[in-house]
Amino acid sequence: MRTIVPFLLALLMAAGSSLSAQTICIRNTPRQGNTHWQQMTTNWSRSCPDRGNRNRGDRNRLHIQLGGAAHYSHGLLSESAANATYSPEFTGWQGTGFAGIRLEPGRRKRSNVIGAWGTMGFLPDAALSNLLLLQGLPDDVDPGSSGHEFREWEVGILFKEWFRISAGRGWQRYTDLSLDEQELAYYTATAGVSLNITRSIKWNTTATLLFGDDFAEYAFRPATGLAFRFNAF
C-alpha cells in the first residue's frame, strides 16, 4: 500500500496537467531494499523541464513585425512610362507593420501565419507625377507640398513565416495646384519573401500591384527593407 499511494497521486497530478507525461517526474528511490516511486519535489529543476515551459507548445501564437523599406514606383507599361529605366527620383520610403496568428505555435518551428499588414509611405514628386500620367489623370501636383502620403491595408497569409501572399485596399493623397487635398483609391495585391538575418531581424522584399477603382492602369511598386520580429503569448 505504501508503494501504491504515491504512484496514484502522481497519476492524478499528471491528469491535472493536460495529461502530458512530461509534466510529472518520478524516480526509483531505494528504501530498505525496496523500489519506491516518489514524486520529485526538491530536485524538480535538475531532473525535470522547467515548470514555466510546460505549455511552451501553446505559446508564441502572436507574430509581429515592425520595419521600414525603400520602394520604387514603376508602372507596368514600361515602354511608355517615364521611369522605364531606373532613376533615384522614383525612390521613396515606407513603414510597415504586421500582426498575425501562428497556426502552429511553438518557439523553434516556423508556422503558417494569418494576419494583417499596414503600410504608410510617401511618394516623391516625380513618382507621383508619373503615376498620375500613367492613370490618364492631370499632373497638377503642387510642387511646394512636402511628401505625398499613401496608406494601405492588406490581409493574407505568411507561409512558414517567409513567403507572403496578401491583398487589400490603398489610398494615395496629394495636394493639387489649387492647394486642395486629393485622394485616389485603389486595390492592392502583394507577394513577397521574408528572410531571417538574425533571430529578431528579417529582410523583407515585396512586390505590390496597384489596380482598380481610381486607377485605370496597373501600377507596380517593389520594396525592400528590414523589420524587427518577435512572437508572443
Image (tube, helix red, strand yellow):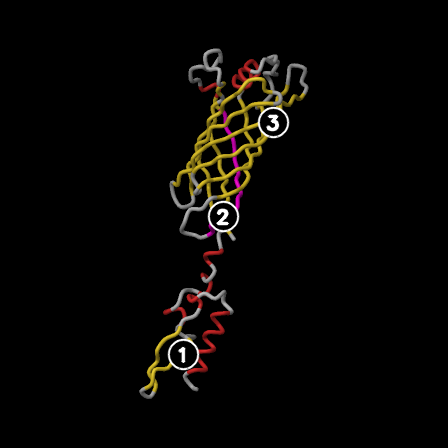
Amino acid at circle 3? Trp
Residue contact between numbered discs 2 and 1, judged by CB atoms under 8 Å:
no
Mark 1 sits on what residue? 38
Residue in view at x 47 percent, y 47 percent = 230
Q: Of helix, strand and loop, which one carries label 1?
A: strand
- Image x and y of residue 160, in percent: 43, 43
Q: Main secondary structure of the magenta part?
A: strand
Tell which of 48 and 168 is nearer to you.
168
Q: Earlier in the sequence, mark 2 or mark 3?
A: 2
Identify the image quadrant of residue 138.
Answer: top right
Q: Nearer the viewer, mark 3 or mark 1?
A: 1
Tell which of 93 and 184 is nearer to you.
184
Q: Of helix, strand and loop, which one carries label 3?
A: strand
Mark 3 sits on what residue? 171
The CA span between labels 2 and 3 is 31 Å
Residue in view at x 45 percent, y 75 percent = 10
Give the quadrant of the N terminus: bottom left
The CA span between labels 2 and 1 is 38 Å
What segment carries the magenta color?
A: 92-105
**Is 83 drawn above or below residue 60 in the view shown?**
above
Mark 1 residue crowding within 10 angstroms, few (<14) / some (14–19) / many (20+): some
Q: Of helix, strand and loop, which one carries label 2?
A: loop
Mark 2 sits on what residue? 103
Mark 2 residue crowding within 10 angstroms, few (<14) / some (14–19) / many (20+): some
